[in-house]
Amino acid sequence: DQQVKQNSPSLSVQEGRISILNCDYTNSMFDYFLWYKKYPAEGPTFLISISSIKDKNEDGRFTVFLNKSAKHLSLHIVPSQPGDSAVYFCAASDMGSGTYKYIFGTGTRLKVLA
Amino acid sequence: NAGVMQNPRHLVRRRGQEARLRCSPMKGHSHVYWYRQLPEEGLKFMVYLQKENIIDESGMPKERFSAEFPKEGPSILRIQQVVRGDSAAYFCASSASTGDTEAFFGQGTRLTVV
């Protein structure tokens, strides 16, 4: 039962353009969402997060949008840079349960072409 | 402030041997999580521990796998009688106590069972 889904395994974008990575979830109890970036042979690094009380959070070139009614979130990267090429994981958590565990999607491999 | 430290980075075991993976959380962090990433898959939650307590082990296989986080020392993920299917990257993450919603990941231990 995949509670967090990233349906696009890969995405290629030209440098300078916008990258949009999508994520869907099924558990309506999830109230906190995060995006992590992962390079090969390294651990995931935190990128940006959003609480369910918000619908948008911005940090520099990265913006996360949350649509609770559709159970959908997206990460926008603009402008995209070659160094952004990595695997991006979205994760969700039910903070209200007190366990703080994250459920991850399967990842989207972003390739930014120079 | 050192990040989450995992060792070893690479571990090779023969079928039937035991594997011990260690994780030292960030200084001041008392929550530890273990995740497993199989080839071409996302990160699967295994277990969530606080000092001397297992809080959530819903992702742990019922047999051969165990985890601990003692009062002193690192968290240990132990896999007994390893099989080829245990070959994966195992990531540890840590977070501070209440109110901290972001977990920091270590670089992972890549286990290869031959």
Image: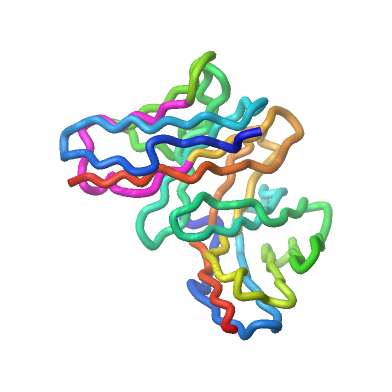
Pick the front one: A19 or B55: A19
B90 vs B99: above or below: below
Which residue is at a point 48% across and 24% down the rendered structure image?
B74
Pick the front one: A99 or B67: B67
- A65 sits left or right of A114 in the view: right
Asked where in the image residue A61 lies, by quadrant, the reply is bottom right
A55 vs B23: above or below: below
Q: Position of residue B81 (x, y in %)?
A: 20, 32
The magenta segment is: B75-91
Does B77 lie within the magenta span? Answer: yes
A32 vs A106: above or below: above
Q: Position of residue B78 (x, y in %)?
A: 34, 29
Say how many tags the image has. 0
Location of the N terminus of chain B (image quadrant): top right
Q: Residue furthest top?
A: B71
Which residue is at a point 61% across and 69% down the rendered structure image?
A84
Which residue is at a point 73% across and 29% down the rendered structure image?
B98
- B113 sits left or right of A107 in the view: left
- A99 sits left or right of B63 in the view: right
- B108 sits left or right of B16 in the view: right
Protein image colouring? rainbow
Q: Position of residue A62 (x, y in %)?
A: 74, 66
Asked where in the image residue A26 lies, by quadrant, the reply is bottom right
Does B33 lie within the magenta span? Answer: no
Which residue is at a point 39% across and 42% down the rendered structure image?
B9
Q: Position of residue B62 (x, y in %)?
A: 33, 33
